Image: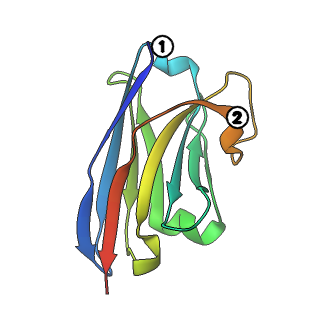
Amino acid sequence: QVQLVESGRGLVQAGGSLRLSCVVSGLTFSSYGMGWFRQAPGKEREFVAAIAVSGGTTYNTASWKGRFTMSRDNTKNTVYLQMGNLQPEDTAVYYCAVRRRGSTMYRNPHEYDFWGQGTQVSVSS
């Protein structure tokens, strides 16, 4: 049984930082690409970042790359999302997900087979 457990939820002020973690069990973690998505109230789920088996990363936009950093630690079966200079528009539930083996469609949520329960990030102005 594959499980993803996210942590790191929090309320921060604009300009603040937060690090999310996602621990994965039930599969050979090092063999799978991973992704982070987010969903704000009333909006569709949005791609945030992805990391490949090799450790290569992809971000929603180039500007996000400067504020968001995704990493993985295969010894801990964990992926991280370090977020900086957070703004109110970053308020959302953040989800980590396991990408289907062999898929390179990082931005498509349908390419991810397993999802965490989500963790709330709230940014006040």
Secondary structure type for disc 1: loop
Considering the image in quadrants, where does the N terminus appear? top left
Residue 37 point in image, percent of width and height: 54, 51
- Does residue 116 lie above or below 64 as drawn? above
Residue 14 point in image, percent of width and height: 32, 81
Disc on res. 111: 2
- Does residue 40 lie above or below 23 as drawn? below
Q: Amino acid at mark 2?
A: Glu
Closer to us: 61 or 22 = 22
Of pointers 1 and 2, the one earlier in the residue sequence: 1
Residue occupying the point 24% across, 68% down = 11
Which residue in the structure is indicated by mark 1?
27
Q: Amino acid at mark 1?
A: Leu
Considering the image in quadrants, where does the C terminus appear? bottom left
Residue 67 point in image, percent of width and height: 46, 68
In this rendering, position of residue 36 left or right of residue 84: right
Q: CA distance from mark 1 to mark 2?
A: 17 Å
Residue 2 point in image, percent of width and height: 45, 18
Secondary structure type for disc 2: helix
Mark 1 residue crowding within 10 angstroms, few (<14) / some (14–19) / many (20+): few
In this rendering, position of residue 121 left or right of residue 72: left
**Farthest-out residue, front:** 42
In this rendering, position of residue 89 left or right of residue 100: left
Q: Locate residue 122: give its quadrant.
A: bottom left
